[in-house]
Image: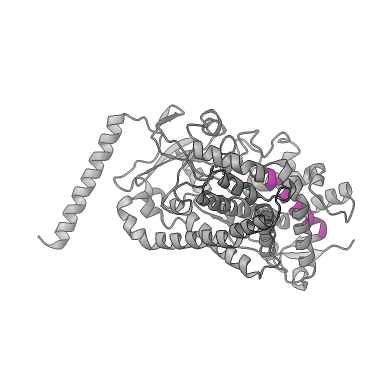
Amino acid sequence: MDLLLLEKSLLGIFVAVVVAITISKLRGKRFKLPPGPLPVPVFGNWLQVGDDLNHRNLTGLAKKFGDIFLLRMGQRNLVVVSSPELAKEVLHTQGVEFGSRTRNVVFDIFTGKGQDMVFTVYGEHWRKMRRIMTVPFFTNKVVQQYRFGWEAEAGSVVEDVKNNPEAATNGIILRRRLQLMMYNNMYRIMFDKRFESEDDPLFVRLKALNGERSRLAQSFEYNYGDFIPILRPFLRGYLKICKEVKERRLQLFKDHFVEDRKRLASTKSMNNEGLKCAIDHILDAQQKGEINEDNVLYIVENINVAAIETTLWSIEWGIAELVNHPEIQKKLRHELDTVLGVGHQITEPDTYKLPYLQAVVKETLRLRMAIPLLVPHMNLHDAKLAGYDIPAESKILVNAWWLANNPANWKNPEEFRPERFLEEESKVEANGNDFRYLPFGVGRRSCPGIILALPILGITLGRLVQNFELLPPLGQSKIDTTEKGGQFSLHILKHSTIVAKPREF
Ligand code: HEM
């Protein structure tokens, strides 16, 4: 028999076995599965739907198959939920059943198979990690302790931009400076540290490694090896790079931040609660034997991704919308001037006196959700949803973007119109009090960082609009707001050049 024939025969046998196993599994269990396109052996629906399962493509599929549908992606089940009622069922009513997280071959590497908090299954470890992280990160006390730092960082952005002659003429990529600000906002909380400038070598290394981690994790490039286990050997090169990035990153966190802080703690009296930064609390938990050294590093890893990028993307989207809607920018500036007085630099407590600013923030998070599919959920055991059987360990995506952009539930949702949150949607908050609007999720696995993200967004956008007229570069009427989606993220594709003309006071 020639080689080609042998190959074909083996492939034929393999396909037959897979089909037989799939059919017997489904028959054996008599599952009533959610609707969806008809799967083919081995590949499931993957060849039909492709790799780019972003919020818009999934919305298209929801229009075809309904508010709950199932995609078979190779060996993995993917259930997509697209109505407020079903979102409530997944996140609230059956919050425990659907409160775990899927990982994939790449996230397994970056999280040490769930030794972190964000990607761990629902259970003892998650509860402990969330409890340990709450006091140092997620309380109003933290906001009150660090808000002066955030105000100072935003103030320093304003100063640097004013001092840069390019800013008022050709424009600058404002995001670069805001990225430094976001690192400083979070590194102050974590390690009581900040970086002096965009050229600080440690900041440059950190930024590069975090960027690489995000790119590798959010890419669709590795799907084939994740969906179809027999193809996994072809992913070896990709996974090797992931492992290297993960190790270099954790080593950097350890050598330059965690160990530094430990040394400082041993030379300085840390009895005074006020002097403690987040890592001191986390290291206390390690000393008590509640968590191990790896867990400490994974907490740092989680904050680097969950806190810094999401907030930065949202600031970037907010600026883009304000540049592209000058009348809204003007109205916001007018509110800041009249409520606070011209020249009075906005502070955290001021944000509560500024309804239009809050509406701008909410509208940004509605139209340009940083995590439009939430962080994928998972059911550890077989479950029921909307009368369908959901096989154990299915990946559950809640299309939060569509919930907040479905014209059946919102007036002209494609328009950037902050007024909606002062008019017909004035009761809707970002904390999940309405299942149509879940930019931070809701329930057990919802975002605990909302308490920090909202004031940081308000202070940053407020300071920029108070101090500058933000415009597209000369000759352009708008900046490009093409989106770039990932496994579950959404950011702006091009980091635009923005002209920032200082205001005269
Ligand atoms: C605008 C900024 C932010 C947005 C839009 C955002 C959004 C989200 C979303 C949608 C989730 C998943 C909810 C779910 O799966 O049901 C999440 C989870 C999470 N976020 Fe945020 N987030 C932001 C900022 C932050 C900040 C500043 C921090 C930390 C300081 C943070 C820490 C976390 C953590 C730890 C989780 C995982 C919670 C868990 O699995 O139990 N986030 N975030």
In the image, taking residue 139 as reference, residue 23 lies left or right, namely left
Quadrant location of the C terminus in the rendered image: bottom right
Residue 447: tell me if it is visible: no
Residue 154: tell me if it is visible: yes
In the image, taking residue 343 as reference, residue 47 lies left or right, namely left
In the image, taking residue 218 as reference, residue 12 lies left or right, namely left
Picture residue at 40% right of the left edge, 59% below the top: 239
The stretch drawn in magenta includes residue 259: no
What is the total number of numbered labels drawn onto the structure image?
0
Give residue 455's position: percent from left, percent from top: 73, 47
Q: Main secondary structure of the magenta part?
A: helix
Hey, which residue is sitting farthest left in the picture? 1
Q: Ligand 1, what quadrant?
A: top right
Residue 197, quarter of the rendered image: bottom right
Give residue 463's position: percent from left, percent from top: 79, 55
Q: Nearer the viewer, residue 403 or 375?
A: 375
Q: Nearer the viewer, residue 279 or 218?
A: 279
Quadrant location of the N terminus in the rendered image: bottom left
Give residue 95's position: percent from left, percent from top: 52, 32
Magenta residues span 445-467
The stretch drawn in magenta includes residue 463: yes
Give residue 12's position: percent from left, percent from top: 19, 50
Q: Which color scheme is applied?
A: one colour
